[in-house]
Image: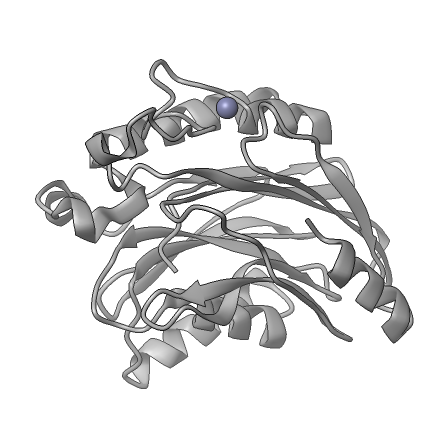
Amino acid sequence: MPDGCTAIAKIIGNRSILAKNRDLIWTDFCDTVVFENDVFIVTGVDTSNAQICGASFGMNRWGLVACNTTVLVTQDTAYDILLERVLRESKTIDEAFNLVRADLNHGSRYQWCNFILASPQGVGAIEIGDGVAVLEQDYIMIARTNHHLLLPTADILRHASPAEREAGGPLATSQNRRQEAFKLLQEAKSTSDFMQILSTHHKGRGFDSICRHRPDNPHTEPYLGETVYSYIAEVSYFEPERMEFRINVAPGNPCSSTYKEYLIDFNASPQEKENIVLDFP
Ligand SMILES: [Zn+2]
């Protein structure tokens, strides 16, 4: 499903933190989560038939955390399906990139997007365009909104229709939003700093605002939508075999909502996992 979205990731000491504001044009949207032996996934939705599909945000027991942001809505497959495979089949950012490249080489095509990833080894972004993918890796931090930084797609995005950009919005607003998120991320030292970043507004609180608000009259901006969920995933690693996973989630605009924290224990009983699935807002 095309999400607007701002995604940021940073390594802080022995923790990796990855966060996303999910901006959608749909109203009354409610998350569905999947918690299995190896993966915890916030699902996507196929806009063509409103069926749950793939992953919009998630983590796996090997310490890989990932989410996506939309770049261009095409007739191709929803990228959420590919992100779910990444979370189920990859332990590292390199493995994730190899999986994406191999899938594209086999002829699969997806709507254009970014995958933002964090692992104990560092953070990264996989940019996916028309049958191509490139990887940016960093030891410390990364940020993406609704455009590519490495793939030369800026001219195409600049001339795309509002429907093709959907909640991604005009290119310049996405660029402003990323620059602001990256600047704030440089100072972030804690989960609460991430909460602050995700609650940041730009004047007008529209496409260039990290926390996005629906306009008083939605007909004036049919693709603007609003921030419907805010997520912060955190992996603390003490040694290769000992990791602790947490997710904070706030439904609605994070500036006025409250985050709920869950400890994600992949060794928990099926009943304990089910309790989190049912309690997830
Ligand atoms: Zn707000």
- Identify which residue, 68 or 165, lies in the foreground: 165
Q: Which residue occupies 22% across, 66% down?
A: 130
- Work out which quarter of the rendered image holds the N terminus and state it: bottom left
Q: Is residue 184 left or right of residue 239?
A: left
Residue drawn 54% across the image and 31% down it: 253
Quadrant housing residue 64: bottom right
Q: Tell which residue pokes out farthest to the top in this image.
A: 203
Spot occupied by residue 192 in the image (x, y as percentages of width and height): 71, 26
Q: Where in the figure is residue 260, as x and y percent of width and height?
A: 75, 40
Instruction: Tell whether 256 sits left or right of 46.
Output: right
Q: Is residue 128 above or below residue 223?
A: below
Q: Is residue 239 visible?
A: yes
Q: Is residue 153 visible?
A: no
Q: Is residue 212 above or below residue 279?
A: above
Q: Along the line of sight, which residue is nearer the eye, 150 or 191? A: 191
At x 42% / y 72%, what residue is drawn? Answer: 100
Q: Is residue 143 above or below residue 165?
A: above
